[in-house]
Image (tube, grey):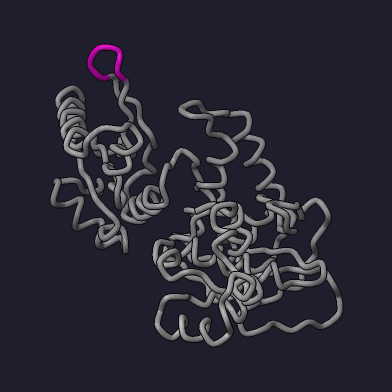
Amino acid sequence: MSVSELSPLVRSTGALLQRGWSERSIAAAVRSGALTQVRRGWFMAATDAAELWPEGRHLAHVIAVTRDATGDAATSHVSAGVWWGLPLYRHTPTRVHVTTDAPQRISSGTDVIRHVAPLPASDVVIRHGIRTTSLARTVFDLVRTLPPEAAVACADAAERMMAQRGREWDEDAVQSWRHGMSERIAGAAGARGIKQARWVTAFANGRAQLPGESVSRLQIVRLGFHTPRLQVPVAGPGAKRYFVDLGLDDVGAFGEFDGQGKYLDEALRRGIPLEQALLEEKQREDWIRGTTQRKFARWGDEHITSPAALAARLRSFHITPRR
């Protein structure tokens, strides 16, 4: 859910009182589960909150904190990440992150963590009405501090934001983005997490369409396969052109990550019955198998929780790394 969609759903005590609630009825609604408390003094309808992914829940928290905030600190790290629409992949923040370059001692609160770090003007933007770190600074902070799986998912998503134009790919934009990130990392030698940041940004590939594809690629490389190609084109019947998520070229195989709701989303996007979407996908896979003579494996979220889990799944399709 975007900032503009979520903002009206996050309401203060004052806003609820103006709508006819009383402090007693607010407290009763929280106790009964009808209202979810985002932070002290800020609430959402429980039905709205229940529909949110972890990124959306944190975004609601960020909205509440920024509405209460004073001073010139910028939203940063994971909190800037969700503000930019980046995925967190199984990382669930409990506090909102802000950064300031103020030299004086500052303290963090129970639900806000404040970082003191250099913050040049070029690293701060106004986005959706709040001060937040730029996309490049946000990614720099995230690839240094997140677990590797989430760091790769964020780096891939940011690169995709910079370069993807439908099915077209702006290679000049990719190169400019990568050059900028490389320069930023080179200028931060010795910073916390810089070794991971260097590896993750070199590994990043915005052609990954989903966080699960990003993590799949990471686990595949950890297993000893060559780095797979992404969104591999395969000529289809007639003038059709298919794209396969991952090409494991070193072992002559294709792989596809089936994220939660993938086929339902496809059916809704094209306005066709789910059964038709599933049939078309089977026909597509059969064509790809038949024309390329490659092995073809599918997996889901449960198979990328560890390299071992994905290895077991791939073995069931007779796909193993070359030794």
Residue 126: horizontal and vertical position, in percent?
75, 52
Q: Quadrant of residue 79?
A: bottom right
In the displayed structure image, the side of residue 237 where residue 44 appears, left or right: right
Residue at 42% from the left image edge and 51% from the top image edge = 211
Position of residue 257 measured from the top left corner of the image (x, y, whole percent): 30, 46
In this picture, residue 7 sits left or right of residue 128: left
Side of 129 where 163 appears, left or right = left
- Furthest residue toward right: 103
For the record, the magenta segment spans 236-240
Residue 94 horizontal/vertical position (percent):
53, 76
Can you give x and y, in whole percent of width and height, for residue 29 in the image? 46, 81
Q: Which quadrant holds residue 48?
A: bottom left
As drawn, is 209 to the left or to the right of 285? right
Q: Is residue 158 above or below residue 76?
A: above
Q: Is residue 137 visible?
A: yes
- Asked if the stretch drawn in magenta spans residue 238, the answer is yes
Question: Which residue: 63% across, 60% down?
Answer: 80
* Viewer-closest of 33 and 170: 33
Dominant secondary structure, magenta = loop
Q: Quadrant of residue 64?
A: bottom right
Q: Residue furthest front?
A: 20
- Check if residue 121 falls in the magenta segment: no
Direction top: furthest residue? 238
- In this orientation, does residue 154 appear? no
Residue in the image at 71% along x and 73% along y: 68
The mark tally for this picture is: 0
